[in-house]
Amino acid sequence: MGIHNVPFLLKRGGRASVLAILLSAAPYPDLAQETNASEKPKPAAPAWAQPGSATHVQVAPPADFHRPSRNFDTPIGIFEGQSDIGSAVLPGSASYAAGTGRYTIHSAGYNVWYTRDEFRYLWKRMSGDVSLAADIEFPDPNGYGDRKAVLIIRQDLDDDSQEAIAALHGLGMIQLGQRAEKNVRVKDMEFRIGGRGRPGGATPDSLVNVMARRIGIEKHGDSFALFVSVEGEPMHQFGPPITVRIDGSFYVGIGFCSHLPDKIDSAVLSHVVLENSAGKVR
């Protein structure tokens, strides 16, 4: 059954405006297709958003560049809703297989690294302490190396929200990052375990095929810790925690960014654990 004439709120800078959109009668889970985006000209991706290459370096967006997120209050699995945070030039989508507990997320998006984010986000409103973990796969072995499957706790759904982020990159790097306040650049700790062609130098032959498959993040007050299982061993804390102030109720969930502003890729996150308590990452 399609969804029609659905009003929703887009909030930015403390103001809220009601935007009514007419959605086509396309079945869930392809929510993004309901916007009839294919019938509209695709916005051009700005030069700063293009990924790094031999002739180009991706840079942070202009200080005043923001796009309102597209938000869908439609449950998927254990999550209450979905968003295209930052409204990448191609809309994302997601599906859930109840029998296997697998979430497949499709998204474009230039990055989740600088002063604003572009990614597909499956979220739940929560408060207090949180434990979140998931197995991660990238179905396309040839996807861009810096694509990111993410576990994120965010203050809001704006593209520049305060947040704590645990990410697994396409080449195997693991990241624990934070945006301590709105519209500032993400700061992070980076852990390179293995993975062919990883950044930071040559990988020893013994580590070429070593790559974390399960990551987790734990919120305990204002402290956020990263947890990792590399080869199926019990999850263990990786590195020191970070401190981020996220007040009241907030958004907790999983997502994916292709690191390509105008090209969709996919990630699969499964065996998701989400508990409203610290110390439950497993």
Image: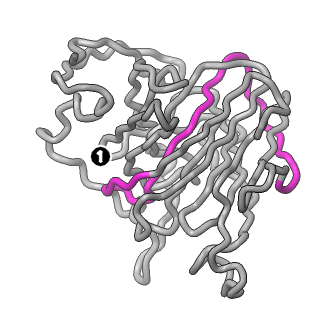
Point out residue 154 in the picture as x, y percentages from the top left corner. Answer: 63, 32
For disc 1, the neighbor class at 10 Å (few under 14, some 14 to 19, many from 20) is many
Residue found at the far left of this picture? 39
- Residue sitting at x 41%, y 70%: 142
**Direction from residue 80 to residue 206 in the image, left or right:** right
Residue 218 figure quarter: top right
Residue 220 figure quarter: top right
- Amino acid tagged 1: Leu
Q: Observer-nearest residue: 87 or 35? A: 35
Label 1, on which residue? 90
Count of number-bearing discs: 1
Residue found at the far front of this picture? 99
In the picture shown, does residue 63 fall above or below 52? above
Q: Observer-nearest residue: 15 or 207? A: 207
Q: Observer-nearest residue: 111 or 98? A: 98
Point out residue 135 in the picture as x, y percentages from the top left corner. Answer: 61, 48
Point out residue 87 in the picture as x, y percentages from the top left corner. Answer: 37, 39
